[in-house]
Image (spheres, rainbow, N blue to C red):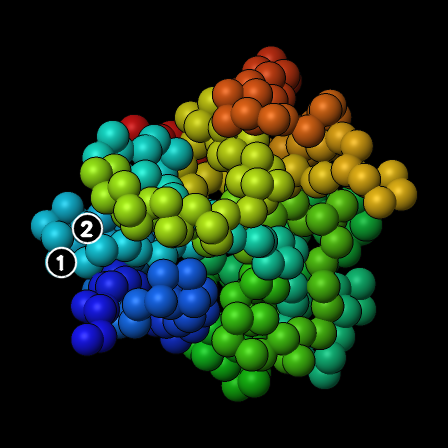
Amino acid sequence: MTEKALRLGTRRSKLAMAQSGQVADAVSQVTGRPVELVEITTYGDVSREHLAQIGGTGVFVAALREALARGEVDFAVHSLKDLPTTQPDELVVAAIPVREDPRDVMVTRDALKLTDLPRGARIGTGSPRRMAQLNAYARSRGMDFETVPIRGNVDTRIGYVHQGELDAVVLAAAGLNRVGRSDEVTDFLSVDTILPAPGQGALAVETTADNADLIAALAELDDPFTRVAVTAERSLLAALEAGCSAPVGALADLLTAGQSVKEMRLRGVVGSTDGATLVQLSTTGPVPETHEAAMALGRELATEMLAQGAAGLMGERAH
C-alpha cells in the first residue's frame, strides 16, 4: 500500500514551483513518501504595487503559513529572504538546505558589464537595497545611470531588456539558476559591490511545531553552515528593526584555511536609495556553534551600524 502523499505548500510562480519541486524530490528521497505540490496565491503575487509600498515583510509568506495552520498542507517552502525575522511559536523552520549562489546578477543589452553601461543607462530593480548600493557605486566611480523601480517575475523583468525598455535589470543569481536561465546572466555582481539581501539564495522549509516526525525527517535536509550564516544575517536585519524591503544588505562568509573552516565574516550595509549615504561595516570571529551565538553576532554588528547612523537610512521599519 502506497503511503499517503505529503502536501507541500508553494507559491505559484515559475521560480517558486521550481525550488519547491527540488525540495519535494529531496523530501521524497528522505521519507520514501510521494510529495504533491499545493499551489497557493499570496498577497505579494497578486498586488501590483512595489514591495516598498505594500510593506514587503511577509507578503509572500502569510498565505502559506495560514494554509499550514489550517492543516491544508504539511509543510511549505519559502525563499528565506521573504520570511519575517520573527518566527511564530506554532511553526518551525525544520530545514535550511545548502545555499545557492547568494550574489546579484545583471542581464543587460548587448552583453554589457556594469562597468560598460553607457551614460544615462536605465537599470531596473524592485529592491531599495540594490538601488542604494548601485547608486553609491555610480557615485564612487563617476558613472551616470538611472535606477528604475520594476516588479514582475523573471520573464517580465528580462523582457524589459529584450524589448529595449531598459538597458539592464538586476536579479538574484539563485533564482536564475533554479529556473535554468543562468546562461542569460551577463555580469555577476561582486558582493564587494552589492551585498545581497539577508538570506538571499537560501530556502526555508517550514512546518508546524507539533509535527515531530516530519520535523525529524526534514532535518536531514538541513545544512548547518548555511543555517548559522543566514541566522547571523537575519539577526542583523531584526536588530536594525528593518523589514525585508528596507535597503539592508548582509552576507555571512565562511572563511577557510586549507580544508577547514576557520572563521565567519559578517558584512552589513544600509544606505539611502540615492546612494548618497552608506553605512557599511563587517565583523569576523569564530564560526558560531549555536543559534544564540549566530544571533549575537548579528546583533553586535547591527549595534555598531546604528551607532554610525543606520537608523536614519531605512524607509521601512518592521512591526
Verify CB contact (< 8 Å) between mark 1 and mark 2.
Answer: yes
For residue 269, above or below residue 284? below
Q: Depth check: 293 or 50 in front?
A: 293
Q: Helix, strand or loop at disc 2?
A: helix
For residue 218, above or below residue 6? above
Q: Position of residue 305 (x, y in %)?
A: 61, 21
In the figure, residue 253 lies in which quadrant?
Answer: top right
Circle 2 sits on which residue? 68
Q: Position of residue 26 (x, y in %)?
A: 45, 65
At 81% across and 40% down in the image, what residue appears?
260
In the figure, residue 232 lies in which quadrant?
Answer: top right
At 84% across and 45% down in the image, what residue appears?
259
At 36% across and 61% down in the image, what residue appears?
31
The amino acid at mark 2 is Leu
Q: Quadrant of the N terminus?
A: bottom left
Circle 1 sits on which residue? 72
The disc placed on residue 273 is: none
Within 10 Å of the Cα at label 1, are there few (<14), some (14-19), or many (20+) other Cα atoms? some
The amino acid at mark 1 is Glu
